[in-house]
């Protein structure tokens, strides 16, 4: 019970800057809109995109990209707090150590869902067909994935502590291969065999396929449960690793 209460306190603290500055969430969708506006027309000129609709295939991948980039960078906030002493002040409070990590990770769900809703609203006039229930389940899976990625980002920040350059080097070294090997922006049907094999061990591949099935209204696809399991595993692993790092850093 104490863990739940402490997590709620940390969650409210982390959300307070977002409530005070909601425009930061709005501006954060500029990058995905650039991908939609510039990359989408390039894909439209090819015949490699599966399905009948480019946007129905492309938009779910953009939503997962938003989750990947947004949550994988959140550890930088913790780095800033460690540099300013704010994190140390939190650790001397009676709050439980796991709550310091879980509350921060849960916070990532809110801007992630808001950004996804805004992006879908933008593409609706361009022929994107919305299946509300599928979109709702898809956003839930994205939120679970965001918790896992955010927790791993915080764990990385705790591991490198004052070495900010190391945080960004590791983050970018991991993120870009995950992005390319997931089929997020381009189909991998014509990729070399080793890239296809690598995509099969990439958990993001399953999340993206689940999002594409759900946003197409196909609840019966095996990709849905496979993507849900991949997101859940990412969340469990992220929280376990992050909580362990938080306990070690404050012991």
Image (tube, rainbow, N blue to C red):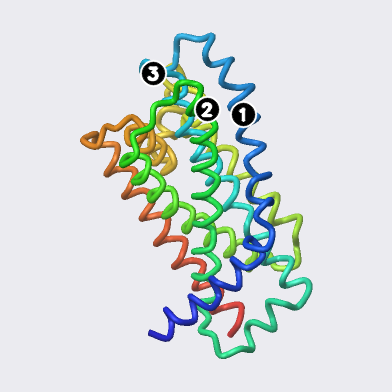
Which quadrant of the figure contains the C terminus? Answer: bottom right
What residue is shown with label 2? Answer: 185
Q: Residue furthest right?
A: 84
Residue found 62% across the figure and 83% down from its top: 91
Q: Nearer the viewer, residue 179 or 143?
A: 143
Q: Nearer the viewer, residue 124 or 139?
A: 124
Q: Secondary structure at mark 3?
A: loop
Which quadrant of the figure contains the N terminus? Answer: bottom left
How far apart in space, not on screen, are marks 3 and 2 (Cα)? 12 Å
- Mark 1 against mark 3, which lies toward the viewer? 1
Residue found 50% across the figure and 21% down from its top: 126
Q: Nearer the viewer, residue 192 or 157?
A: 157
How far apart in space, not on screen, are marks 1 and 2 (Cα)? 9 Å
Question: Circles 1 and 2: CB distance less than 8 Å?
Answer: yes
Q: Tag on residue 50? A: 3
Image coordinates of residue 100 in percent, x first then y, are: 55, 75
Note whether 73 is above or below 6 in the view shown. Answer: above
Total numbered circles? 3
What residue is shown with label 1? Answer: 35
Image coordinates of residue 188 in percent, x first then y, are: 45, 23
Image coordinates of residue 218 in percent, x first then y, are: 26, 32
Q: Secondary structure at mark 1?
A: helix
Image coordinates of residue 108 in percent, x first then y, are: 54, 58
Note whether 174 is above or below 46 in the view shown. Answer: below
Question: Circles 3 and 2: CB distance less than 8 Å?
Answer: no
Residue found 59% across the figure and 63% down from its top: 154
Q: Looking at the image, is mark 1 or mark 2 earlier in the sequence?
A: 1
- Mark 1 against mark 2, which lies toward the viewer? 1
Note whether 151 is above or below 197 in the view shown. Answer: below
């Amino acid at each position: 019970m104490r863990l739940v209460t402490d997590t709620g306190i940390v969650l409210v603290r982390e959300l307070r800057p977002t409530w005070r500055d909601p425009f930061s969430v709005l501006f954060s969708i500029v990058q995905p809109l650039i991908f939609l506006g510039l990359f989408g027309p390039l894909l439209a000129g090819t015949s490699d995109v599966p399905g009948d609709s480019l946007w129905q295939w492309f938009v779910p991948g953009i939503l997962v990209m938003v989750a990947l980039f947004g949550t994988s960078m959140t550890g930088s906030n913790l780095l800033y707090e460690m540099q300013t002493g704010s994190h140390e002040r939190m650790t001397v409070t009676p709050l439980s150590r796991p709550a310091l990590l879980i509350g921060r990770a849960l916070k990532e769900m809110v801007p992630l869902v808001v950004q996804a809703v805004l992006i879908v609203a933008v593409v609706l006039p361009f022929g994107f067909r919305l299946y509300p229930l599928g979109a709702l389940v898809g956003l839930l899976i994205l939120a679970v994935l965001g918790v896992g990625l955010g927790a791993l980002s915080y764990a990385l920040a705790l591991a490198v502590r004052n070495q900010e350059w190391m945080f960004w080097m590791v983050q970018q070294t991991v993120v870009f291969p995950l992005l390319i090997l997931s089929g997020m922006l381009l189909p991998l049907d014509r990729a070399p065999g080793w890239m296809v094999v690598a995509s099969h061990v990439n958990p993001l591949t399953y999340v993206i396929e689940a999002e594409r099935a759900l946003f197409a209204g196909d609840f019966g696809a095996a990709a849905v449960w496979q993507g849900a399991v991949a997101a859940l595993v990412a969340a469990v692993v992220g929280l376990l690793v992050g909580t362990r790092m938080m306990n070690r850093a404050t012991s």
